[in-house]
Structure formats: structure tokens, C-alpha cells
Image: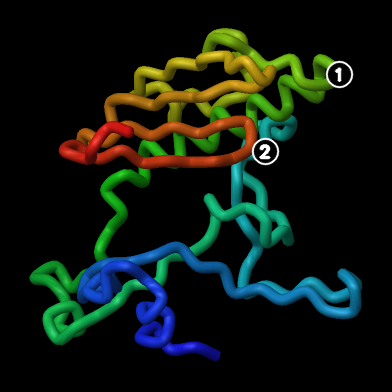
Amino acid sequence: ALSYKDLLAYTANADFGPKPGSWMRINFSRVERQGDINWTWQPQITWDPPNKRHSGFVDMHRPDAWGYFVFAGEEEEKGTEDGNTVPKDPAWPGRLAAMNVYYAQNCYAQNKGGNNYASTIEELAGLVDDSIVGPFQIQISPTKSNGYVVTVMGNPDGSIVTVTQERLLVVIRPGDPVI
């Protein structure tokens, strides 16, 4: 095992690192005996378009379903007035909507026999959870590589969330530099 301090020795900014109250996504699972044993703390709960509900999967390759690891300092250990000691991810509603569309797109493409993805949210009717995607403005942009980029706008924290057919999810917060 490496300490975080050891890992920081290889970064350009040695001041970079977790601060109290910050968090990262993490999954505690283990695969043994070439996949015969797949152990996890809990199923990875994600949108299941064919069944029109969230379902649990034993699949560590669903990072959108991983838990949050919170770095605590003295203030975080005390908690807040309402007794909550865990900070919330302000981009969570947009992340959830983006991944809802991602799973719907996979189902849509499978139903169409391959890499034919929907180009509008309306084409995904019946495959998305309207209560999750409804509050957002969602744009689906086809890419030159026969894929797509989903853009979710209207997140309560002002962030914009994107996801690609490769499951690359990016949160762009207000004030983030545009690359």
C-alpha cells in the first residue's frame, strides 16, 4: 500500500491532495479465482431500462454507482446543526440524469442491433426515468466516431454534466476553465 503522501511525490503540485470536507468516488470490491468469486460491499445500483427501474448489479465496472469516500477534519467530525456529517455531491442530480441517459442509450443501441444511438431525448422515451431526466435540459450530440455526447444542463449547483458512449462522465462547474 502507498500513502497519499508517497503518491503526491510524483505530482507537479505537492500541495495537491485531499482537504477536509473533500471527497472522491471509491468502490470496495474484489474478484478472485479468475472471476469465479466477485465480492462487493453492495450491489452497484444503476438504471435498468428494460425493467424500467433501478436494479442492483454485481459489477465493479459501474463507477457511477460507487460510494463516496469523504476526507474528514475536526469540523467534519463534529457534524452540522441537522446532524448530517456527510457532505453532499452538489452535482449528483445531473450525474444521475446523465447516467440514466447513458444506460438508455445502451439499451436503444442494443435494440437497434449495434451502434445506432438516439440523437434526441425524445427517441429514448420509455427507456429513461422521466422523474430523473425531466427537470433537466438534455442535449444529445452525435460524434464523428459514431458515438455521442450527452449534455445535461439545469443542475441546481449550476454545473453542466456530460457523458459519452464510453461512459466518460465530466462535471463542469461554474468558473471551471473551458478546455
Question: Which quadrant is home to the N terminus?
Answer: bottom right
Q: Residue at x 41, y 76 (%)?
A: 10
Q: Earlier in the sequence, mark 2 or mark 1?
A: 2
- Kind of element beneath mark 1: loop
Total marks shown come to 2
Residue 134 percent across, percent down from the top left: 40, 22
Q: Residue at x 53, y 28 (%)?
A: 129
Q: Nearer the viewer, residue 8 or 45?
A: 8
Q: In the rendered view, tell whether residue 176 sits above or below residue 23.
A: above
Q: In the rendered view, tell whether residue 71 sits above or below residue 172.
A: below
Judging by the rendered image, the residue that carries numbered circle 2 is: 48
Asked whether residue 85 appears in the rendered view, the answer is no
Residue 178 percent across, percent down from the top left: 27, 32
Q: Which mark is residue 16?
A: none
Amino acid carrying label 2: it is Asp
Asked whether residue 95 appears in the rendered view, the answer is yes
Tag in front: 2 or 1: 1
Amino acid carrying label 1: it is Gly
- Kind of element beneath mark 2: strand
Residue 172 percent across, percent down from the top left: 31, 38
Is the residue marked by circle 2 packed among few (<14), some (14-19), or many (20+) residues within 10 Å? some
Residue 28 percent across, percent down from the top left: 59, 74
Looking at the picture, the colour scheme in use is rainbow
Is the residue marked by circle 1 packed among few (<14), some (14-19), or many (20+) residues within 10 Å? few
Q: Residue at x 71, y 76 (%)?
A: 30
Q: In the rendered view, tell whether residue 91 sits above or below residue 163.
A: below
Position of residue 26 in the picture relative to residue 4 (left or right): right
- Where on the picture, by quarter, is residue 159? top left
Q: CA distance from mark 2 to mark 1?
A: 18 Å
Q: Which mark is residue 113?
A: 1
Q: Residue at x 22, y 74 (%)?
A: 15
Question: Which quadrant is home to the C terminus?
Answer: top left
